[in-house]
Image (spheres, grey):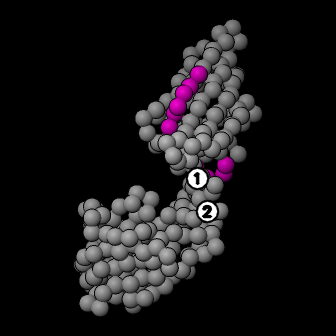
Amino acid sequence: MAITLGAVTFDDKHTTVREKQEEVGGRNERQIEIVGVILGESSLSDVESKLDAIADAASEEDYSAVLSVRAGRRLLVRRESFVREVARESLAGSFALKLAAKDPFEEASSTTNVNWTISISGATKAVSANGNVFSRPTITLVASGAVVNPSFSDGTRTIAFSGTVADGETLVLDAVTGLATLEDEDVTPYSSGLFPRISPEGTTLTYEDDDASSHAASVTVGFRDRWW
């Protein structure tokens, strides 16, 4: 499969990738080095343009560039260094690009969404991930009637919102960002607990709310499969 970084697609015949795990500041980070050559261009400016595009494909400032080394998977990376050389006589170029992924886990390029209709407090939903480590869900609840103090648990971890989600309003509990929003307003201070995890072995999510609740909502559990 072709290796891609943002809009750049590398020539797999002339590109090699090396990966390693490294501890940075007490946490694991994935280090990726992409080394390759630019061949077959018709002018020196074309070679320079290809090298410029590679250098610009990842920011030095944040982990926002999408790198895909394996089909259907991605890493969010930043550029640590870029070394380039140009052979003017042969119209060729070479490069060594070093990238870092703050989150060392690869994740699926697309999101899995599981729909769940809530009609009672204590409702359950079986969900499973396809990676080899747990996935972090984004739980979106759209209330039918007033939903009071909703919570979601995987049996070990429970995330709860202290408040009322009015009829038609949307509450989002996002394990990836660690944030809770109600109608796009940050309500994280009114949430408590730990976000559930979706495991490859399977997870049963349990929904609960207060007696004064309508016990009715449409829920979407979205997550990306992850691999170590």
Residue 204, percent from left and from top: 54, 80
Q: CA distance from mark 1 to mark 2?
A: 9 Å
Residue 212, percent from left and from top: 26, 90
- Residue drawn at (52%, 33%), measured in percent from left and top? 79
In the image, the segment drawn in magenta is: 70-83
Asked whether 81 falls inside the magenta stretch, the response is yes
Residue under label 2: 133
SS label for mark 2:
loop
User: Mark 2: few, some, or many residues within 10 Å (few <14, many ≥20)?
Assistant: some
- Residue drawn at (55%, 58%), measured in percent from left and top? 110
Q: Is residue 181 above or below residue 88?
A: below
Q: Which mark is residue 128?
A: none
Q: Is residue 35 above or below residue 132?
A: above
| Quadrant (top left/top right/bottom left/bottom right) for the C terminus | bottom right
SS label for mark 1:
loop
Residue under label 1: 105
Q: Is residue 31 above or below residue 129?
A: above
Q: Is residue 53 visible?
A: no
Q: Quadrant of residue 94?
A: top right
- The foreground one among 193 and 106 is 193
Amino acid type for the residue under numbered disc 2: Val
Q: Are marks 1 and 2 in contact (CB under 8 Å)?
A: yes
Residue 71, percent from left and from top: 66, 51
Q: How many marks?
A: 2
Question: Is residue 92 rendered to the left or right of residue 26?
Answer: right
Dominant SS of magenta comes to: strand
- The foreground one among 217 and 8 is 217
Q: Quadrant of residue 120?
A: bottom left
